């Protein structure tokens, strides 16, 4: 067992409490906390004891206790995992990395499958994010209807635009998604939808990769070289000047 495997036994709710993150347990095996990965004014990070993982419904950050320790304490992944194990009185294994990262070969067909899966997850996530933003705005408008007010009409136009954008993402092909990723990396376009918009890049795609590996049995297990190759493929640019 490695330190990364051992730290997965620690509850993220317990880790959040020990790290002094603002929030509380909300029920059996669950909790809501102010996410340390963005400026969270209201607790939007949910922790689940059933999986010992967290998920932020605003910035979409996810991970285990080691990720929380790394962010709050400013530690490297290995240092964070060891710190968490030490503070919870758990034995620190000798290994410091996942066994799957020992290989250095790159299976191109496996990388291609992983890249398609990550693109698909990103596409679904963008569609869900935009639709959720539109639904939230419509919900607020319904509580205070003012068809003649300029703010109400401006919000309506933005909600409609978000719904159209969500539908566009849902209909995208794999090639369309990659083109959108490249365009966003070059021109920084996606953040126009406001705080918390999933922004393409190696950090986000790495999070998606880890999440798919944990929850999707069909997602290929990649060694370190293959992970780097997958991220390189996703973050490639198309303009010659880039």
Image: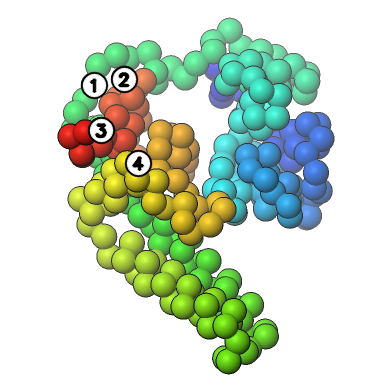
The percent coordinates of residue 20 (x first, y second) are: 82, 35
SS category of the residue bearing label 4: helix
Q: Closest to the observer: 189 or 92?
A: 189
Res. 222 visible in picture: no
Using a 10 Å C-alpha cutoff, classify the residue at mark 2 as few (fewer than 14 neighbours), some (14 to 19) or many (20 or more): some
From the image, tell me which residue sits under label 3. Answer: 242
The earlier-in-sequence mark between 4 and 2 is: 4
Could you tell me if the residues under marks 1 and 2 are in contact, i.e. CB atoms within 8 Å?
yes
Give the label, 4 or 1, closer to the camera: 4
Q: Which residue is mark 1?
A: 106
Q: Looking at the picture, how far across and down is residue 32, in whole percent?
A: 73, 51
Label 3 neighbour load within 10 Å: few <14, some 14-19, many 20+: few
Please provide percent x and percent y for residue 142.
62, 85
> In which image quadrant can residue 109 be found?
top left
Visible residue check, residue 33: yes
Q: Which residue is mark 2?
A: 225
* In this rendering, position of residue 72 left or right of residue 216: right
Q: Secondary structure at mark 1?
A: loop
Q: Quadrant of the C terminus?
A: top left
- The residue to which callout 4 is attached is 185
Of residues 183 and 74, the one drawn nearer to the viewer in this rendering: 183
> CA–CA distance between discs 4 and 2?
23 Å
Q: Residue at x 61, y 49 (%)?
A: 56
Q: Residue furthest front?
A: 150
Which mark is first along the chain, 2 or 1? Answer: 1
């Amino acid at each position: 067992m490695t330190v990364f495997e051992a730290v997965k036994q620690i509850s993220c709710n317990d880790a959040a409490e020990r790290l002094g993150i603002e929030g509380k347990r909300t029920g059996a095996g669950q909790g809501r906390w102010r996410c340390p990965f963005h400026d969270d004014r209201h607790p939007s990070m949910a922790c689940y004891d059933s999986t010992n993982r967290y998920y932020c419904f605003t910035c979409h950050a996810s991970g285990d206790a080691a990720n929380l320790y790394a962010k709050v304490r400013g530690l490297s992944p290995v240092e964070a995992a060891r710190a968490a194990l030490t503070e919870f009185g758990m034995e620190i294994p000798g290994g410091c990395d996942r066994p799957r990262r020992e290989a250095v070969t790159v299976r191109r067909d496996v990388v291609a499958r992983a890249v398609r899966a990550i693109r698909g997850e990103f596409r679904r996530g963008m569609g869900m994010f935009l639709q959720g933003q539109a639904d939230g705005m419509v919900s607020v408008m319904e509580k205070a209807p003012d068809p003649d007010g300029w703010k109400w009409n401006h919000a309506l136009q933005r909600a409609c635009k978000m719904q159209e954008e969500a539908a566009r993402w849902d209909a995208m092909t794999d090639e369309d998604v990659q083109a959108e990723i490249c365009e966003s990396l070059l021109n920084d376009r996606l953040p126009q939808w406001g705080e918390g918009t999933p922004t393409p890049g190696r950090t986000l795609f790495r999070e998606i990769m880890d999440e798919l590996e944990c929850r999707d049995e069909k997602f290929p297990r990649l060694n370190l070289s293959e992970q780097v190759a997958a991220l390189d493929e996703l973050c490639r640019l198309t303009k010659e000047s880039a």
